[in-house]
Image (spheres, grey):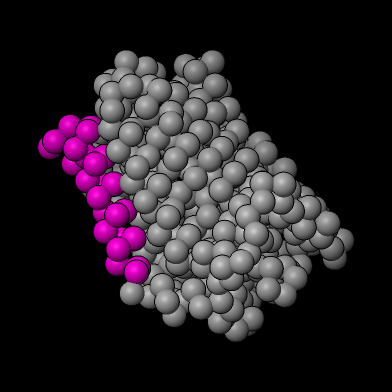
C-alpha cells in the first residue's frame, strides 16, 4: 500500500512540475514572460482545491485506488493539452492537472489511516509524501533533457505516457484496497463546503491549515521559480538549473523521512514545525541573497537544505491532520485542510511572480517570502511557550 501510494504521488507531482522545470523554454515557445509560471501554478491549484474538496465523497463512492487512477489520467490529459503551443490550451491543461493532483493525497491518507499505528504515523505519512519531492526530482532531472532532445511537445507527452502507465500498474491492487468503497455513496456539489466546515469547527485543524497556507507557498515558490532564478540571475544552463532543482527535491525526500522520524521520536508535531519554519526563514533569505559568483557547491548545499525544510514539512502536517480527524474521516479532513494548503499555492507563486516582476529580480521574491514565514515561526514559538497551539503527536 505504501509503495503504490508513493509511486502515484511521485507521478502526479512530476506532472505538476514538468512545465516549471522547463519554464524558460516553455515561455519562449509561447512568447510570454517566465514570470507567468506563477500564474500557471495558480491555475493548477485552483483545480486542485476543487478536486480535494470532492475527494472525501469520491473516495467513498469509487475507492481510493480508482480515484487515484482517475487523477493520473487527468494529469496525462492536462499534459497532452499543454503540449499544444497555445496559452489557452496550457491554461486548460493546468486546471486538468490540478484536478488530477488534488484528490491524490486525501485518497492515500484514507488508505494509510486505516492501517498505520499512531506511534508511527508521522514517519509513514512522511515516507509516502516523499513522492512529491521525488516527482520534483524526476521533473528536474528528466524533463529538460526530454525537451532539449525532442522539443516541448514530445517532452510533455512522454511525461503524460508515464502517468498512464502508472495508472495501469495500480489496477491489480484495486480490488483489495478499494474493498471499503460504497457504490451508493452520494456525490453532491452542495457538500463541497463540508470538509472546510469540519476543519474550521476544530481549532487544532484550523491552526494547522493556516500554517500550511504559508508553508505551501514557500514550497511551490522554490519548485516553480528556482530553475528560472538560476538560469536568468546566476547564469546556469537549463540542464544545470534543472539538476539543481533535483538536488532541492532530493533534500525534500530526505527531509520528509527525517522530520517524520524526529516528530515521532523526539519533538512532536508542534516543535518540529517550529524548527522547520525557522529553517525556511533562513533559506528563503539566503537564496534571495545569492550572488552570481556563488560557488556551485554552496548553491547546491543551500538548495538541499531549502528543499529539506520547505518540502519536508508535509508528512508531519498530514499525519497530525489524520490523527485529529474524527474516526473514519481522515480523507475528508485531509481534503478540507489541503484546500487551504492549496490556496497558499494559488496565491504564493502568483504574488512571487508579481514581486519579482516589480523589482526586476527573482531575488526580491525569495527575500519577500522570509517575512510571512518568520511570522509563522514566531506564532509557533509563542504557542509553544503558552502551552497551546498545534498538538504534539
Q: Residue at x 35, y 55 (%)?
A: 11
Residue 284 locus on image (x, y percent): 53, 40
213 left or right of 292 in image: right
- Which image quarter holds the C terminus? bottom right
Q: How many marks?
A: 0
**Magenta region, main secondary structure:** helix
Question: In front here: 41 or 54?
Answer: 54
**Image quadrant of residue 89?**
top left
| Residue sitting farthest toward the right | 386
Residue 48 locus on image (x, y percent): 54, 45
| Residue sitting farthest toward the front | 184
Q: Is residue 384 above or below residue 216?
A: below
**Magenta residues (range):** 146-171
Q: Residue at x 43, y 35 (%)?
A: 94
Residue 40, visible in the rendered structure:
yes
Question: In front here: 368 or 195?
Answer: 195
**Image quadrant of residue 19?**
top left
Residue 287, visible in the rendered structure:
no
26 left or right of 95 in image: left
Residue 240 locus on image (x, y percent): 24, 40
Question: In front here: 30 or 313?
Answer: 30
Residue 67 locus on image (x, y percent): 48, 60
Q: Is residue 160 above or below residue 371?
A: below
- Which image quarter holds the N terminus? bottom left
Examine the structure image and report whether residue 258 is included in the region drawn in magenta: no
Amino acid at each position: 500500500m505504501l509503495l503504490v501510494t508513493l509511486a502515484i504521488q511521485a507521478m502526479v507531482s512530476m506532472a505538476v512540475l514538468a512545465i516549471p522545470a522547463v519554464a524558460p523554454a516553455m515561455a519562449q515557445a509561447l512568447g510570454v514572460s517566465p514570470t507567468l509560471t506563477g500564474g500557471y501554478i495558480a491555475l493548477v491549484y485552483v483545480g486542485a482545491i476543487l478536486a480535494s474538496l470532492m475527494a472525501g465523497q469520491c473516495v467513498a463512492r469509487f475507492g481510493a485506488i480508482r480515484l487515484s487512477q482517475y487523477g493520473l489520467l487527468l494529469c496525462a490529459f492536462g499534459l497532452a493539452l499543454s503540449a499544444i503551443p497555445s496559452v489557452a490550451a496550457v491554461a486548460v491543461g493546468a486546471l486538468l492537472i490540478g484536478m488530477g493532483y488534488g484528490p491524490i493525497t486525501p485518497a492515500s491518507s484514507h488508505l494509510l489511516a486505516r492501517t498505520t499505528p499512531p506511534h508511527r504515523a508521522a514517519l509513514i505519512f512522511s515516507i509516502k509524501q516523499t513522492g512529491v519531492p521525488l516527482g520534483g526530482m524526476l521533473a528536474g532531472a528528466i524533463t529538460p533533457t526530454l525537451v532539449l532532445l525532442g522539443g516541448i511537445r514530445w517532452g510533455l507527452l512522454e511525461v503524460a505516457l508515464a502517468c498512464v502507465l502508472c495508472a495501469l500498474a495500480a489496477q491489480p491492487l484495486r480490488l483489495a484496497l478499494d474493498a471499503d468503497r460504497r457504490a451508493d455513496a452520494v456525490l453532491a456539489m452542495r457538500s463541497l463546503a463540508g470538509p472546510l466546515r469540519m476543519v474550521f469547527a476544530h481549532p487544532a485543524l484550523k491552526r494547522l491549515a493556516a500554517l500550511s497556507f504559508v508553508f505551501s507557498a514557500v514550497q511551490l515558490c522554490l519548485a516553480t521559480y528556482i530553475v528560472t532564478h538560476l538560469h536568468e540571475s546566476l547564469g546556469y544552463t537549463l540542464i544545470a538549473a534543472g539538476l539543481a532543482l533535483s538536488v532541492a527535491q532530493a533534500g525534500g525526500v530526505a527531509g520528509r523521512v527525517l522530520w517524520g522520524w524526529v516528530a515521532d521520536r523526539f519533538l512532536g508535531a508542534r516543535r518540529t514545525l517550529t524548527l522547520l519554519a525557522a529553517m525556511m526563514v533562513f533559506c528563503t533569505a539566503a537564496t534571495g541573497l545569492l550572488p552570481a559568483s556563488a560557488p556551485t557547491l554552496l548553491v547546491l548545499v543551500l538548495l538541499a537544505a531549502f528543499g529539506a525544510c520547505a518540502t519536508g514539512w508535509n508528512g508531519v502536517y498530514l499525519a497530525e491532520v489524520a490523527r485529529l480527524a474524527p474516526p473514519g474521516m481522515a480523507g475528508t479532513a485531509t481534503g478540507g485542510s489541503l484546500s487551504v494548503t492549496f490556496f497558499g499555492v494559488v496565491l504564493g507563486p502568483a504574488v512571487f511572480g508579481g514581486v519579482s516582476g516589480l523589482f526586476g529580480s527573482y531575488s526580491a521574491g525569495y527575500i519577500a517570502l522570509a517575512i510571512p514565514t518568520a511570522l509563522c515561526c514566531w506564532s509557533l514559538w509563542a504557542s509553544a511557550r503558552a502551552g497551546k497551539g498545534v498538538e504534539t503527536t
